[in-house]
Amino acid sequence: MTPTRRIAPDDPAREDVRALLEEHLRDMHAQSPAESVHALDVSRLKRPDITFWTVREGDTLLACGALRELDPAHGEIKSMRTPHARRRCGAGRAMLEHLIAVARQRGYRRLSLETGSTAAFEPAHRLYASAGFVPCGPFGDYRPDPHSVFMTLAL
C-alpha cells in the first residue's frame, strides 16, 4: 500500500523539519549576501503571526511552507522549501496551493512573497508565476534590494 500524501500543521523544531530549514538557510546564504537573506529560522517560525505546515508521504518529509499574517487583508508566504532529493514530485506546488487556499479562507485580499533574484531561484519564480503571482514592489518591512524579487497575488 502506498502512503497517502498529506499537508498538516507541523512543528518547525521537529528533527527532520529542522534539518530541512537549516538546508534552506545554508542555500539562501550561499546565493545571497547576509543582509538580503530573509529566510526564517525555527524560533522565528514559531511566532504567533505565522502558521507552519509540512507535506508528508507517510513519515517522509516532502516540503514545508508557512503563512505570515501581515495585516487582516494581506498574507506573506514564508519558508517554502522542498528537500533537494524530493524536488519535482509536486509537493512544492501542493504546498503553494494549500497556502493560497488558506489565505482565501482567512479573507486575505493579497498574498505576497519575497525570493531571490539569481538564476538559482528561476524554478521558484516559474512556480509562483504559474499560480498567478506577478512582480510587485517591496511590501511590509522589505526595502528595495537587487537580490530580492517581490511577487504578489490578488485573491
Image (cartoon, rainbow, N blue to C red):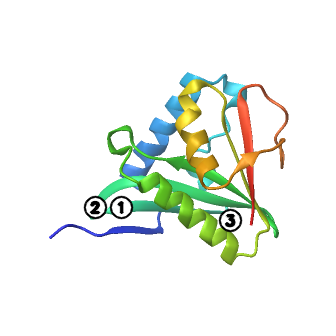
13 versus 117 height, above or below: below
Residue 109 rendering spot, x and y as whole percentages: 80, 68
Name the amino acid, label 2: Asp
For label 3, the crowd category at 10 Å Cα-Cα, with few meaning under 14, some 14 to 19 and many 20 or more, is few
Observer able to see residue 11: no
For label 2, the crowd category at 10 Å Cα-Cα, with few meaning under 14, some 14 to 19 and many 20 or more, is few
Query: Dot 2 corresponds to which residue?
Result: 59
Name the amino acid, label 1: Arg
Name the amino acid, label 3: Pro
Quadrant, the C terminus: bottom right
Query: Dot 3 corresponds to which residue?
Result: 48
User: Which one is in front, 89 or 17?
Assistant: 89
SS state under label 1:
strand
For label 1, the crowd category at 10 Å Cα-Cα, with few meaning under 14, some 14 to 19 and many 20 or more, is some
Q: CA distance from mark 1 to mark 3?
A: 23 Å
- Total marks shown come to 3
